[in-house]
Image (cartoon, rainbow, N blue to C red):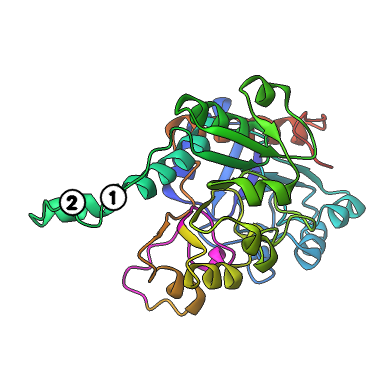
């Protein structure tokens, strides 16, 4: 039996990983703390570790893992911007991930944010609970015939396109790689600048890399239509939050829907309802009446968690057996 330390472990992680551990080939040690230079020692005597989006596997952490003779890291997510891949390769540490785990889950959450903002469901819900049935301030807009620009047409972007096509939206896309399935849906590919300029609604569906970090900055926001709706369910670092706040204050951005946040690692996935949050940028964001933020829950469906757990367990067993995984990064 192989020992695997699972960082950032929540109740649902335990439930689904244990359920997927058929044959009990893995012994899980669930740790609530994030992986960092301060917590990496918790992985001692393990054969592998399993991490999530806000765990940090940088140079210092990887060197410590190598000293513990831990040569396998299993990401239970698709993104890997939190891992120093080159350093891992130089240390002989194998990295695997879950490349996709229900694109429809994130796509449906994306469209849910758009619909909630466009029809003000969240405000109407609270009003009715208080006995206020006035429609003043609840004016919405149709998605039909709206121009929606999607940045990134991978699995999640394409799944989002399919849903929006059903609403009768005009579809624009920007991606270095043209997806034939997107073209078949009637989408038109443009440069990023053109997409920003022509879209009524902009939704981000791309990984966080050095090239995409802060792709939505002051320059990008200035190119957008007045009254644009901006949605991000991908990675918080795609948006310069300071520029975002300026865009909201200037009323350039009419509606904002976020499931991710640039500095979310100290906030999301925790119950901080009895805590004073000292992140002034986040606190400023939530004061805007036209901003809707969810806590990185786009992936959070039964189907997605099942796929994440099953793929993670399969990846671990494959690598621990000395074999190559199709989901291996290095």
Is residue 53 on the magenta stretch? Answer: no
Q: Say if mark 2 contacts mark 1, CB within 8 Å.
A: yes
Q: Is residue 74 visible?
A: yes
From what the image shows, is residue 320 above or below residue 113? above
Residue 227 location (% of width, % of height):
48, 57
Taking depth in this image into account, of 192 and 163 the one nearest to the observer is 192
At x 69%, y 36%, the residue is: 316
From the viewer's side, name the closer residue of 236 and 325. Answer: 236
Q: Position of residue 190 (x, y in %)?
A: 73, 40
Q: Could you say which is closer to the camera, residue 262 or residue 318?
A: 262
Q: Main secondary structure of the magenta part?
A: loop
Residue at 48 percent across and 79 percent down: it is 280
Residue 135 — which label?
2
Provide the residue span drawn in magenta: 255-275
Q: Which residue is mark 1?
A: 139
Element marked by disc 2: loop
């Amino acid at each position: 039996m192989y020992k695997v330390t699972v960082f950032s472990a929540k109740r649902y992680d335990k439930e689904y990983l244990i359920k997927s551990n058929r044959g009990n080939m893995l012994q899980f040690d669930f740790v609530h703390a994030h992986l960092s230079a301060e917590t990496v020692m918790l992985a001692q005597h393990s054969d592998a570790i399993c991490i999530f989006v806000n765990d940090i596997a940088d140079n210092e952490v990887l060197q410590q893992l190598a000293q513990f003779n831990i040569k396998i890291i299993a990401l239970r997510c698709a993104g890997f911007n939190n891992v120093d891949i080159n350093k891992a390769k130089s240390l002989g540490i194998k990295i695997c991930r879950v490349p996709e785990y229900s694109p429809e889950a994130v796509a449906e959450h994306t469209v849910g944010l758009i619909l909630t903002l466009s029809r003000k469901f969240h405000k109407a819900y609270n009003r009715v609970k208080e006995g206020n049935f006035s429609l003043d301030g609840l004016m919405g807009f149709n998605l039909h015939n709206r121009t929606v620009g999607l940045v990134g047409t991978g699995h999640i972007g394409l799944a989002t396109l399919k849903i929006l096509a059903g609403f009768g939206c005009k579809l624009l896309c920007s991606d270095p790689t043209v997806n034939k399935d997107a073209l078949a849906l009637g989408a038109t590919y443009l440069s990023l600048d053109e997409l920003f300029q022509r879209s009524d609604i902009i939704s981000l569906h791309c990984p966080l890399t050095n090239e995409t970090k802060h792709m939505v900055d002051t320059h990008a926001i200035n190119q957008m239509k007045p009254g644009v709706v901006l949605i991000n369910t991908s990675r918080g670092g795609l948006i310069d939050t300071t520029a975002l706040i300026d865009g909201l204050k200037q009323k350039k951005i009419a509606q904002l829907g976020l499931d991710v946040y640039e500095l979310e690692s100290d906030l999301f996935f925790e119950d901080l309802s009895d805590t004073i949050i000292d992140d002034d940028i986040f606190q400023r964001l939530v004061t805007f009446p036209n901003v809707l933020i969810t806590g990185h829950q786009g992936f959070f469906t039964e189907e997605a968690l099942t796929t994440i757990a099953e793929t993670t367990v399969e990846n671990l067993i494959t690598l621990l057996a000395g074999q190559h995984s199709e989901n291996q990064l290095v």
